[in-house]
Image (cartoon, rainbow, N blue to C red):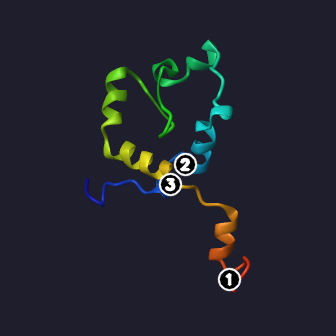
């Protein structure tokens, strides 16, 4: 896809979830409870085909399996394996943290 047709993050209707939000959902103690059947009606594929690492719902098994082989999904897995940034790291980068001696 050429740069002219690529959609920027600023132009999207809805912002995707950040990595720290997805990591919170993947923790064993924070696994979201199953949705009520009435809540699943609004989701594509009735919420049965969800990629937890990308936080996307798919309409059927074929599209879900195709998504698992894409470059975007593989990059997301790599990003989630890195340790997340903390506020202490941000303070150090901004020069607000303790100075090394």
Name the residue at 51% across, 22% down.
Answer: 47
| Mark 3, other Cα within 10 Å: few <14 / some 14–19 / many ≥20 | few
Q: Nearer the viewer, residue 76 or 58?
A: 76
- Residue 84, placed above or below residue 92: above
Q: Earlier in the sequence, mark 3 or mark 1?
A: 3
| Residue 94: quarter of image | bottom right
Name the residue at 66% across, 23% down.
Answer: 33
**Tag 2 residue:** 15
Q: Nearer the viewer, residue 48 or 15?
A: 48
Label 2 – label 1 distance at C-alpha: 37 Å
Label 3 – label 2 distance at C-alpha: 22 Å
The x and y percentages for residue 100 are 68, 83
Q: Earlier in the sequence, mark 3 or mark 2?
A: 2
Q: State the SS at label 3.
A: loop
**Tag 1 residue:** 100
Q: State the SS at label 1.
A: loop
Q: Earlier in the sequence, mark 2 or mark 1?
A: 2
**Tag 3 residue:** 82
Q: Nearer the viewer, residue 45 or 95?
A: 95
Q: Is residue 68 left or right of residue 13?
A: left
Name the residue at 62% across, 75% down.
Answer: 93
């Amino acid at each position: 896809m050429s740069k002219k047709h690529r959609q920027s993050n600023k132009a999207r209707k809805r912002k995707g979830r950040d990595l720290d939000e997805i990591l919170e959902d993947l923790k064993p103690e924070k696994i979201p409870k199953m949705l009520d059947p009435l809540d699943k009606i609004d989701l594509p594929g009735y919420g049965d085909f969800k990629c937890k690492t990308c936080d996307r719902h798919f309409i059927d098994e074929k599209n879900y399996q195709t998504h698992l082989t894409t470059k975007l999904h593989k990059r997301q897995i790599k990003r989630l394996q890195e340790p997340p940034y903390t506020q202490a790291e941000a303070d150090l980068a901004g020069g607000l943290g303790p100075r090394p001696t």
